[in-house]
Image (cartoon, grey):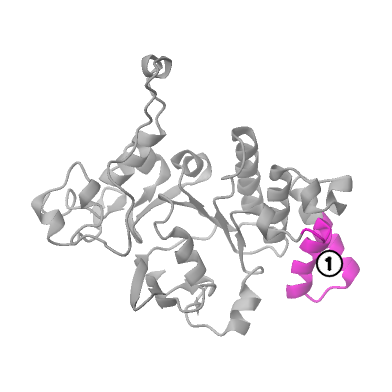
Amino acid sequence: MNGLSASYRVGTTRLAVVRGLRFMIQPGQVVGLLGESGGGKTTAILAMLGLLPAGAVAEGSALFRGMELIGAPEQTMRAIRGARISCIPQEPGLSLNPVIRVIDQVAMVVHAHERLSARGCRDRARTALEQAGLHGSQLHSYAHQLSGGQRQRVLIAQAMVCRPSLLIADEPTGSLDAPSAREILSLLLALVHRMDASLLLITHDPSVAGYIANRVMVMYAGRIVEDGPANEVLRTPSHPYTRGLMRCLLAPPKALARSRDRHVAAIDGAPPDFHYLPTGCSFQPRCPDRMPMCSESDPTPAASGSRQVRCFLYGPDQ
């Protein structure tokens, strides 16, 4: 992406929810896009895929293998979505058709993109579902007959059945318990490696990003504020916002866990309101390290070792 922006019309005003995103995903790379809910992560993906609702506007550039996606004709985007770029949505229960057997739902994806017979489409669907960990009668079940983890596997099979180059997973473990979440993440990693695909994993949970990503981008108020190797960003975060996210992840001390006052760490202040973004750095009202300049101008990304950090704490003068 190069300067990708997206905005929604609300009444007579236009809210910029994604603001000048610039990043590149290399072939075979697993990238985590990390940030609080409402920070613009999903909107960025909808803009890239041409799926923003009516009235929303995407600007800038999103190149996929040399092809410009922003402003591309809908016919072109239909050919790309589900075949060359696939997306696993957040809610399996809302994404699967309740009156169509899951093998047929996966076969429909193949039929939409490839010239195969009905039997060929079902054979491809069966293979994809089995690779996703479903077998036997599960393939001919309806969505309501499957567990949450099994429904998630159906969505994975749908996304991977046409062997895309880029897989986007939007909070794929948000509704799962910890053991099921680990299984799904391990499955995703194994499948993208088998198909030599790239994976963009959208999450609000640093532990999810750290489980499989080799690179992490941290997003706040529609902008990337830190971008670098996953082990560095998550173990020794540079941006104050990233440090706050990691503090929220840490378990409380045992003495506190035994007490009646079991407070969970949280970042001070409220998540960004795109109606009233502050001047200067968007994070400065919540930042423990804010300086006078933070409310006067917006920092630009600066190199900090192997990372890019959007913060005045870093840069040539620091």
Residue 316 in sight: no
Please tell me whether residue 212 is drawn above or below residue 98 in the rendered image.
above
Residue at the location (42% across, 14% down)?
A: 258
Q: Position of residue 39 (x, y in %)?
A: 39, 56
Which quadrant does the N terminus fall into? bottom left
Q: Residue at x 42, y 44 (%)?
A: 230
Indicate yes or no whether the magenta region holds residue 99.
yes
Residue 78: where, in percent of width, then height? 64, 77
Query: Which amino acid type is marked by label 1?
Result: Cys
Q: How many labels were placed on the picture?
A: 1
6 horizontally vs 282: left or right: right
Q: Residue at x 80, y 57 (%)?
A: 102
Tag 1 secondary structure: helix
Q: Is residue 244 magenta?
A: no
Q: Residue at x 77, y 55 (%)?
A: 128
The image shows residue 112 at horizontal and vertical percentages of 75, 74
Where residue 219 sits, quadrant-wise, is: bottom left
Q: Is residue 72 above or below residue 30?
A: below
Report x, y in % for residue 57: 43, 78
Residue under pointer 1 = 121
Question: Is residue 162 visible to the viewer in this orientation of the structure?
Answer: yes
* Residue in the foreground of this view, choosing between 75 and 279: 279
- Secondary structure predominantly adopted by residues drawn in magenta: helix
Foreground: 201 or 269?
Answer: 269
Q: Which residues are magenta?
A: 98-126
Q: Residue furthest front?
A: 11
**Quick one: 188 or 36, which is closer to the camera?**
36
Neighbor class of circle 1 (other Cα within 10 Å; few <14, some 14-19, many 20+) is many
